[in-house]
Image (tube, grey):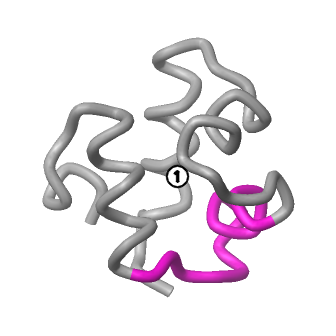
Amino acid sequence: MIQGLPERLRAKREEKKLTRKAVCERIKISEGVLCEYEQGNRTPSLGVLLKLCNFYMCSPNDLL
């Protein structure tokens, strides 16, 4: 797991006042998977990380 990634993912989502469900519907991943990313139990693939960056309008460096 990339240190700090779970916290930054959760912070970005909460900053935009979005539910996990809303994010997952937009980037086409399951809610359980996003939950695992935010809890630090799983690391997103590069493709999913880029989708999240695009959705949150941030660079990968902002999350990593």
User: Is 49 a magenta residue?
Assistant: no
Neighbour tally class for label 1: few under 14, some 14-19, many 20 plus, Cα within 10 Å: some
Q: How many marks?
A: 1
The residue sitting at 54% across, 31% down in the picture is: 13
Q: Which residue is mark 1?
A: 7
Picture quadrant of residue 46: bottom left
Magenta segment boundaries in residue numbering: 33-45
| On screen, residue 16 above or below 51 | above
| On screen, residue 8 above or below 35 | above
Residue 48, given in percent of the width and then of the height, sits at 45, 67
Pick whichever, 13 or 21, lies toward us: 21
The residue sitting at 85% across, 61% down in the picture is: 32
The residue sitting at 60% across, 13% down in the picture is: 17
Residue 15, given in percent of the width and then of the height, sits at 47, 19
Pick whichever, 27 or 4, lies toward us: 27
User: Is 38 a magenta residue?
Assistant: yes
Residue 33, given in percent of the width and then of the height, sits at 75, 67
For this orientation, the residue located farthest to the top is: 17
| On screen, residue 17 above or below 22 | above
For residue 63, side relative to residue 4 (left or right): left
Q: Amino acid at mark 1?
A: Glu
Picture quadrant of residue 60: bottom left
Residue 57, given in percent of the width and then of the height, sits at 24, 32
